[in-house]
Image (cartoon, helix red, strand yellow):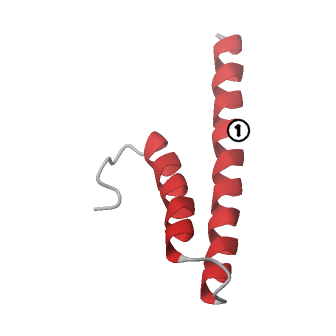
């Protein structure tokens, strides 16, 4: 039982680490977009990656509707 919990904790930690990385990337990309250093298509890819990651854990599948 302890082994299963530690495996779940590891998965949660990996998810949270990725979430933080994707969130930071989204903020930096949006700043670049506002400064005309990134186009909207590239920004959309970054935002889509973040959205997809959030939807993996969300119990509300219509979270963005």
User: Toward which corner of the image does residue 21 lie, by quadrant?
Assistant: bottom right
Question: Of residues 64 and 1, which is closer to you in this image?
Answer: 64
Q: Decide if residue 49 is on the left or right side of residue 5.
A: left
Q: Secondary structure at mark 1?
A: helix
Q: Is residue 50 above or below residue 29?
A: above
| Residue 32 position within the rendered picture, expressed as x and y whole percent measured from the top left | 67, 80
| Residue 47 position within the rendered picture, expressed as x and y whole percent measured from the top left | 52, 63
Quarter of the figure that contains the C terminus: bottom left
- At 51% from the left and 75% from the top, the residue drawn is 40
Q: How many marks?
A: 1
Residue named by callout 1: 13
Q: Is residue 30 above or below residue 7?
A: below
| Residue 51 position within the rendered picture, expressed as x and y whole percent measured from the top left | 47, 55
Q: Decide if residue 41 is on the left or right side of residue 34.
A: left
Local crowd at mark 1 within 10 Å, few (<14), some, or many (≥20)? few
Q: Which residue, as the protein is rendered here, is positioned at the far bottom?
A: 35
Q: Is residue 43 above or below residue 4?
A: below
Question: Of residues 53 and 40, which is closer to you in this image?
Answer: 40
- At 70% from the left and 73% from the top, the residue drawn is 28
- At 52% from the left and 60% from the top, the residue drawn is 45
Question: Of residues 44 and 57, which is closer to you in this image?
Answer: 44
Quarter of the figure that contains the N terminus: top right
| Residue 34 position within the rendered picture, expressed as x and y whole percent measured from the top left | 61, 88
User: Toward which corner of the image does residue 9 lie, by quadrant?
Assistant: top right
Q: Is residue 57 above or below residue 4?
A: below
- At 34% from the left and 56% from the top, the residue drawn is 63
């Amino acid at each position: 039982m302890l082994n299963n919990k530690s495996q779940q904790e590891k998965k949660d930690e990996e998810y949270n680490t990725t979430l933080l990385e994707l969130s930071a990337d989204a903020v930096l990309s949006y700043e670049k977009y506002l400064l005309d250093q990134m186009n909207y298509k590239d920004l959309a890819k970054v935002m889509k990656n973040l959205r997809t990651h959030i939807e993996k854990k969300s119990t509300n599948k219509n979270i963005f509707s």
